[in-house]
Amino acid sequence: MKTLIFLLIVGISSNLAAAIVPQQSIETITNHSSIVFEGTVTGKKSLKIRGDFFTDVTFEISDLLKGQHKAKTVTLRYLGGFVDGFGSGVSGMKMPDLNEHGIYFVADVNRLYAHPLTGWGQGHFILKDNGLEYNVENSLGSAVVGVEEGGMLKQELSNKRQAATYNAFTARGIEASDDDSAAGMTSEVFKTNIRSIMEK
């Protein structure tokens, strides 16, 4: 049986991690990412380093939307993993699945974080092949049906009236459908929206 060890992150038990990730606007997620790319997960490997468990996720890059990265692949390290039946996990962290195709917003390829994507799941989008094109889903598998810009200003105004909201999976400005039968916007339309944000 696998032994699950919950770790401490910034002094707070990791099973509360999802509740303490501030929801950010899609503009902030984009602007604070060192690279943004479309790619496919080609490998996952868990390892233990000086008593801590990690998982390396390797991606093959098919389209680099932002930043500079000369290699065709990139490996991102996540906190948590299992080796020989023992390991650790962080509640609220969803790692990409093997063979998953998606768009990923990476905080900094040269630094290690508990979660390598900007805003955790807020910077993780899954692309589903419908046979003709790809439809976009958020990290939880809900169809992304719209991208609304201006979330940064709206949050600034909102913060004057109430405390910041917390959401580890969906950025502000990303409209995710609750309808399981809904089809997300196409990847090309989504990428056009992201490129538009970068141009401002």
Image: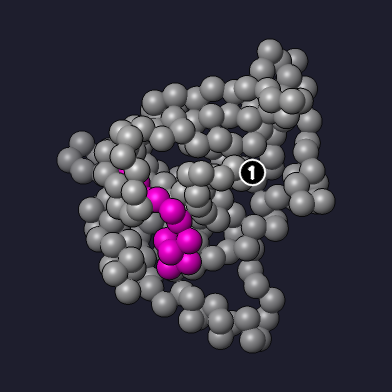
Q: Which quadrant: the N terminus? A: top right
The image quarter containing residue 128 is top left
Q: Which residue is mark 1?
A: 114
Q: Residue at x 30, y 57 (%)?
A: 190
Residue 82 appears in the picture as rendered: no
Q: Is residue 42 magenta?
A: no
Q: Residue furthest top?
A: 84
- Residue 167 horizontal side relative to residue 28, left or right: right
Q: Say what secondary structure mark 1 lies in.
A: loop
Question: Which residue sits at x=41%, y=77%?
Answer: 150
In this rendering, does residue 31 appear at all?
Answer: yes
Please tell me which residue lies in front, 36 or 189: 36
**Residue 5, percent from left and from top:** 78, 30
Quadrant, the C terminus: bottom left
Residue 126 picture location, percent across and down: 39, 44
Name the one closer to the observer, 148 or 68.
68
Image: 60 above or below 17: above
How dense is the environment of label 1, judged by Cα within 10 Å: few (below 14), some, or many (20 and up)?
A: some
Q: Amino acid at mark 1?
A: Ala
- What residue sits 51% from the left and 44% below the top? 110
Tell me the magenta residue range.
Answer: 27-38
Between 5 and 128, which is closer to the camera in this rendering? 5
User: Is residue 85 depicted above or below 89 in this figure?
Assistant: above
Q: Position of residue 58 (x, y in %)?
A: 44, 30
Q: Position of residue 42 (x, y in %)?
A: 39, 26
Residue at left 69%, top 39%? 90
The answer to whether 4 is drawn above or below residue 65 in the figure is above
